[in-house]
Image: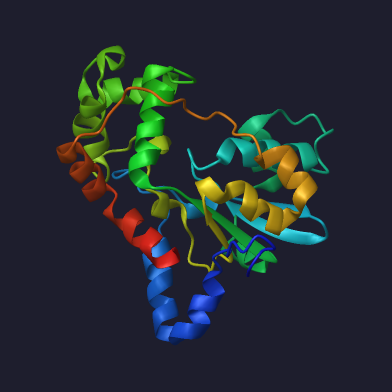
Amino acid sequence: MTSASGRRTRVLDNQQRRSGPHAAHALLELLGGPMKTRDSRSGRPDPLRAHFLFDCEGKSFAYCRIRKNGCSAFQKFIIETSPHRRRGAGGGMVFLRRFHGVNRKRAIEAADHRILVFRDPVERIRSLFVNKFVQRKDCDDIFRSYRAVTGRDPLEASLRDFILRYVSRLGETPLDPHVWPQHWHLSHIIYDRVFPLGELHDGMVETIGQDLANKFFQRKVNSSPLSDVTIDKDLLERISYIYKEDLKMICRVT
C-alpha cells in the first residue's frame, strides 16, 4: 500500500503471496513462535492477552499491545472512542480487558485488520530504562521485580546493571512485562498493518484516517526524553543477543 506521500505501509499478506505457503508458515513461526499458554517458569505470556479489539470507521481491528511501542497512545484511543466508555467500568487496562480483550485466536483472525507496531530493541530497552530508572515513572512494579531477581537496590542501578543482572535473565525467571521480547506478544496470524514506532502517526493515518490519527497519534504519549544514558559496544552486543529473535522479526517486516 502506498500513501499520497509515497510511504509504503508494510503488509505481510503481500509477502505471503510472493513467497508461497511454506514461506508464509515460516514467517508465522518466526513471528509468533509455538503457541503457548503462560509459562510460569520463563514468564512467557499468553499472546491472546496482548491483543485488543476495536471498531473504527466501519471496520474491525485487532491491536497487538507491546509496552514501549506506542501502547499508551493506543490505550487512550481505544478507551476514548469505545462505545462502552460511559459504563463506568474503571479505567486503563481494567476497561480494555473487560470490553476489548480477546480470549480466542479466532476473534483476532476475524478482524478486518490486525495492527503490529515494532521498535528497534536497543532503543526500546534504552527508553524503558530512562522512563523507569531515570525518570522513575510508574516504576513500583519493575523496581519490585528488579529487587527480587537481583537482590539489589533499583535506585542504584545503572543501565549496565539493568541489562546484565536483570534483562539477561529472560527465559529463566519471570520478569516485568516491559522487558518481554516483542515477538513473545504475537499470535500465529498475519498482521496486515505493520509499521515501526517512528512511523506510527503516518501508519495510523492510512489505517483510521487523518482526523483521528492527528488527535491520538500525532503527539507522543509517555515518551522518554533524551538523556546522557549511553550504550557501549559490549552492551549493544549483549542487548542484540538477548533480543535476537526480535531483530529477526524486524528484518522480515522491513
Q: Position of residue 129 (x, y in %)?
A: 36, 27
Residue 249 lies left or right of residue 194; in this view the side is: left
Relative to 166, is 250 above or below? below
* Outermost residue toward the front in this view: 5
- Give the tally of numbered discs: 0
Q: Position of residue 91 (x, y in %)?
A: 69, 29
Q: Residue at x 49, y 20 (%)?
A: 138
Residue 75 is at least partly visible in this image = yes
The N terminus is located in which quarter? Answer: bottom right
Residue 42 lies left or right of residue 73; in this view the side is: left
Q: How is the image coloured?
A: rainbow
Relative to 44, is 104 above or below? below
* Outermost residue toward the left in this view: 234
Relative to 120, is 58 above or below? below
Q: Quadrant of residue 58?
A: bottom right
Residue 214 lies left or right of residue 145; in this view the side is: right
The C terminus is located in which quarter? Answer: bottom left
Q: Position of residue 146 (x, y in %)?
A: 30, 24
Q: Residue at x 42, y 26 (%)?
A: 226
Residue 33 is at least partly visible in this image = no
Q: Residue at x 66, y 52 (%)?
A: 204
Residue 155 lies left or right of residue 108; in this view the side is: left
206 or 115, nearer to the observer: 206
Q: Residue at x 79, y 46 (%)?
A: 211
